[in-house]
Image (tube, rainbow, N blue to C red):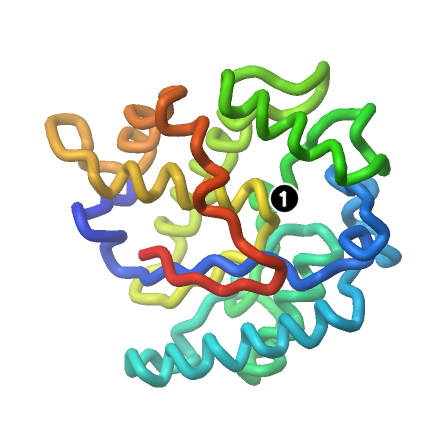
């Protein structure tokens, strides 16, 4: 099992990147199911392509400042069309081949599924879900949807697998608004955890997965196309 020191992950540096502005963003639609999210019609809008390109250029600059060779970059991305499109643009900017091991799709990084009644509906309903998250991050908005805790579970799997697969790399995680907010929440709390039984990442996340921490994921919100180093 991968281990994490108090001030970050052993061996890897991490950035998160929310996908660029997408067709669903422009249409004001919730597209959160894997079935719909992987459709080509829901990829990036033209503005989103520009945002992804700028994110790639910013990453390139930060890598240079930190003396990290591009060969050490790994892009791990959600299978949704808007995230794979973003990852592909960033890879192009860095002149990285869009193939394993440099770029890898990871299903656990997919969008949070909000539920059937939200799917393909107006994004104006997001505040309903976030209000419920504040009240109880272990509760789903509806049958079949994912709670914050559900997303934590699969993100933990993704992070442990990434840590075990890559060493000494700069990892760029290309995902969605809610998953990336939740990911930052649990990693921030896990890094602060000290005490017995906190040697491995999964154990740390399990210990900090409590309502008082998970309910405040919105404070780590990202704009579309926003790149942020987290560890």
Q: Is residue 34 visible?
A: no
Quadrant of the frame with the N terminus: top left
Dividing the picture into quadrants, the one containing residue 125 is top right
Q: Is residue 105 visible?
A: yes
Is 97 rendered above or below residue 203?
Answer: below
Residue 4 location in percent, x, y? Answer: 23, 46
- Mark 1 sits on what residue? 110
Which structural element holds mark 1? loop
Residue 58 location in percent, x, y? Answer: 48, 78
In-front residue for pair 226/34: 226
In-front residue for pair 122/179: 122
- Residue ranking furthest to the left: 195
Is residue 198 left or right of 203 when viewed as pictured? left
Residue positioned 28% across, 38% down in the render: 190
Is residue 10 left or right of 161 when viewed as pictured? left
Residue positioned 63% across, 44% down in the render: 110
């Amino acid at each position: 099992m991968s281990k994490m020191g108090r001030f970050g992950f052993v061996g890897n540096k991490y950035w998160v990147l929310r996908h660029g502005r997408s067709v669903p963003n422009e249409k004001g639609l919730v597209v959160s199911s894997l079935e719909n999210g992987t459709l080509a019609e829901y990829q990036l809008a033209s503005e989103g392509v520009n945002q992804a390109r700028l994110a790639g250029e910013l990453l390139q600059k930060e890598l240079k400042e930190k003396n990290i060779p591009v060969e050490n970059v790994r892009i791990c991305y959600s299978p949704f069309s808007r995230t794979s499109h973003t990852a592909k643009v960033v890879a192009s900017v860095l002149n990285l081949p869009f193939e394993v091991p440099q770029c890898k799709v990871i299903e656990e990084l997919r969008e949070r599924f909000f539920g059937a009644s939200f799917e393909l509906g107006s994004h104006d309903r997001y505040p309903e879900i976030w209000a419920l998250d504040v009240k109880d991050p272990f509760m789903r908005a509806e049958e079949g949807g994912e709670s914050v805790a559900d997303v934590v579970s699969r993100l933990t799997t993704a992070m442990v697998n990434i840590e075990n697969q890559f060493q000494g790399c700069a990892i760029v995680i290309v995902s969605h608004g809610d998953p990336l907010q939740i990911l930052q929440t649990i990693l921030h709390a896990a890094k602060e955890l000290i005490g017995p039984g906190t040697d491995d990442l999964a154990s740390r996340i399990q210990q900090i997965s409590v309502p008082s921490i998970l309910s405040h994921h919105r404070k780590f919100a990202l704009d579309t196309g926003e790149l942020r180093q987290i560890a």
